[in-house]
Image (cartoon, rainbow, N blue to C red):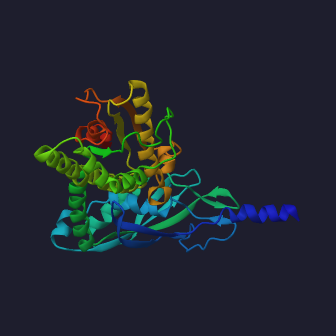
Amino acid sequence: MLLKLFSVFALMLCVSISYAQCDEGNIYGMRGKKTGIAIVKADSNGQHVVPTAAMTLPTFKGGNRAMCRYINKTKKYPVNLKNQKISGTTTVQAKVLADSTLTDIEVIGSSGYDEFDQEALRVVKSFPKMIPSTQSCEPQDMIMQIPVTFIYEEEIEAEKRKEELAKVEKDLLKPITLYFENDRPDPRTTQETTNTEYVGLYNNYMAAKNNYVSSAGKNLAGTKRTEAEKAVETFFNDSIQTGHDRLVKFTNYLVDALQDGKRVEFTISGFASPLSNSSYNKHLSARRIESVLNYMKQARGGVLAPYINGQKPGLTINKVPEGQVNHSFSSNSTSETVYGLQAAKDRKIVIDKITVR
C-alpha cells in the first residue's frame, strides 16, 4: 500500500502545464497587458499530446513565463514589415531531445512573410537547453510547437515603453540620500544590527517635524531664529521626504529588474553627526544601513529578501558604515547638535554607485 502511494506521489511530481502568460510592459511595479501563448506539444508523428500523471512536457528553464520573456527580448521586428505596419504569426516546431538539446527546428505554420518566418526560426534556434519531457520520470524526446507573434501595435508600444523606461531608469539610478532622527534606530546601543525598518523611522521623523523646526531656533532671536526654523522646515519637505519617495521607487525598480534577470549592484553608506565618538558612530551607521535593507526585504511582499540575504543571485550590496562626518559644531547646544540643519544633514544613508546589467 505504501509503495503504491509513493508511486502515485512520484508520478504527480512529473505533471506540468503548457500555458504561458507574459507581461507586456513592467515599469517599476506598474504592470501592462498580458499576452497568452499556448505551447502545443506533439509526438514524433506530429499528433498533439495531452500530459498524464506519468508524463511531463518539455519546459523552458524558468518556466513558460521565462520563455515568453526570452522570445520578446530576442526577436527583432523586421524593419521592412514594421514600416508597412504588417503583423503576423509564425509557428515553429522543434524536437526537444532527452539530453535537453533542440533539433529538427522548422517552420510548420508560415505567417505568409518570409522575414517573419526567418526571424522566428532564428529566435527558437537561439534557445538555451530546455528541460526535456519525461515518461514515468525518465527523459524522452518530444516535439513542441511554438507560435512567435509579430504585432505592429505592440511593437510600437514596446518602443515607447523602452524610451519611457530609459528616462525613468536614468533618474532612479542617481544617488539616493535618506535622513534619520538623532541616535536612531535603537538609541544608546553599540549593536550593528536592528529589526527596525527605515519607513517606520521616517514616519516618526516626519511626525516630529514641528518639534525639530521650533527647536532649531530655540536659542536664536529675530531674523536668525526665523531663518533657522525655515531652513529646517524646508529640509524636511524637500530632502527628507524626497529621499523617502525615491527609495520607494528604487525598491520597486529593484524588484522588477531582478525578476527580469538583470544583475544589480550598489553601495550603501552610513553616516552620523560628530555628536558621539567615532566607534559609536560606526555602529550607529551600520544600524542605519540595516534599517534600509530591512525595508527593502519586506517591500512588495518580501520578494527582495532572498536576494538581499544571498539566497538568490543577481544582487550585490556593498555596505560602508563610514561613521561620523568630518566637522565639528560651534557649540554644544542641542538646538545645533540635534535640531540644527547641519546635524540633520549629517545623519544619513547614501545609496549610490548603482549599476544594472
Which image quadrant for residue 120?
Answer: bottom left
**Residue at point 22% right, 61% down?**
164
Q: Nearer the viewer, residue 272 or 33?
A: 272
Residue 153: % across, % down: 24, 74
The image shows residue 270, relative to residue 124, as above or below, that is above
Which image quadrant for residue 141?
Answer: bottom right
Residue 346: % across, % down: 29, 37
Determine whether, in the image, residue 273 is placed left or right of residue 67. Answer: left
Which image quadrant for residue 337?
Answer: top left
**Residue at point 18% right, 45% down?**
228
The image shows residue 282, relative to residue 222, as above or below, that is above
The image shows residue 64, relative to residue 230, as above or below, that is below
Which part of the image, by quadrant, shows the C terminus? Answer: top left
Determine whether, in the image, residue 295 is placed left or right of residue 44. Answer: left
Which part of the image, by quadrant, shows the N terminus? Answer: bottom right
Determine whether, in the image, residue 140 is placed left or right of residue 124. Answer: right
The image shows residue 178, relative to residue 142, as above or below, that is above
Report if residue 337 is visible in the image.
yes
**Residue at point 16% right, 72% down?**
84
Report if residue 105 is visible in the image.
no
Q: Nearer the viewer, residue 210 or 298?
A: 210
Residue 310: % across, % down: 51, 42
Residue 219: % across, % down: 22, 41
**Residue at point 22% right, 52% down?**
233
**Count of marks placed on residues:** 0
